[in-house]
Amino acid sequence: MDKKEIKCSFCGRDKQDTNVLIAGITGHICDGCITQAQNIIQEELSQRSRSEMEGSLILQRPSDIRGSLTST
């Protein structure tokens, strides 16, 4: 009986070339691909929060800031 070798469905690494190979319903993913995916997710979330923060900022001219400080 010829047993099919288990490989990462994303990068194609053999099971013996990985530290961990997680089995899914129709495929497998290795620790290297998980780390890379996590980095992509963190970067994407960082970009989104940066965009949201920039959208909520209201920039004022120095003369407007000075005026609000002297009027109080």
Image (spheres, rainbow, N blue to C red):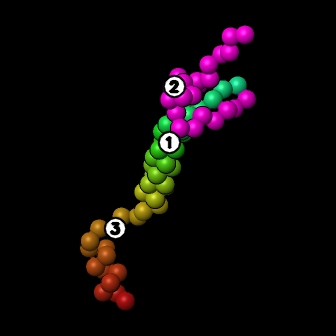
3D distance between C-alphas at marks 2 and 3: 54 Å
Nearer the viewer's eye, disc 2 or disc 3? Answer: 2
3D distance between C-alphas at marks 2 and 1: 14 Å
Which residue appears farthest toward the top when viewing the image? 1
Residue under pointer 1: 35
Q: Amino acid at mark 3?
A: Gln
* Residue at the (50%, 42%) spot, across then down: 35
Residue under pointer 3: 60
Q: Which quadrant of the figure has residue 60? A: bottom left
Would residue 54 be found to the left or right of residue 2 on screen?
Answer: left
Measured as percent of width and height from the top left, residue 1 is found at 72, 10
Nearer the viewer's eye, disc 3 or disc 1? Answer: 1
* Residue at the (53%, 38%) spot, across then down: 19
Q: Amino acid at mark 2?
A: Arg
Picture layout, residue 15 above or below residue 47? above
Picture layout, residue 21 above or below residue 68? above
Q: Is residue 44 visible?
A: no
Q: Earlier in the sequence, mark 3 or mark 1?
A: 1
Q: Which residues are magenta?
A: 1-25
Would residue 39 be found to the left or right of residue 7 on screen?
Answer: left
Residue under pointer 2: 13
Badge 3 vs badge 1, beta-carbon distance below 8 Å? no
Closer to us: 49 or 35: 35
Picture layout, residue 48 above or below residue 27? below
SS class of the residue under badge 3? loop
Tell whether position 17 is magenta: yes
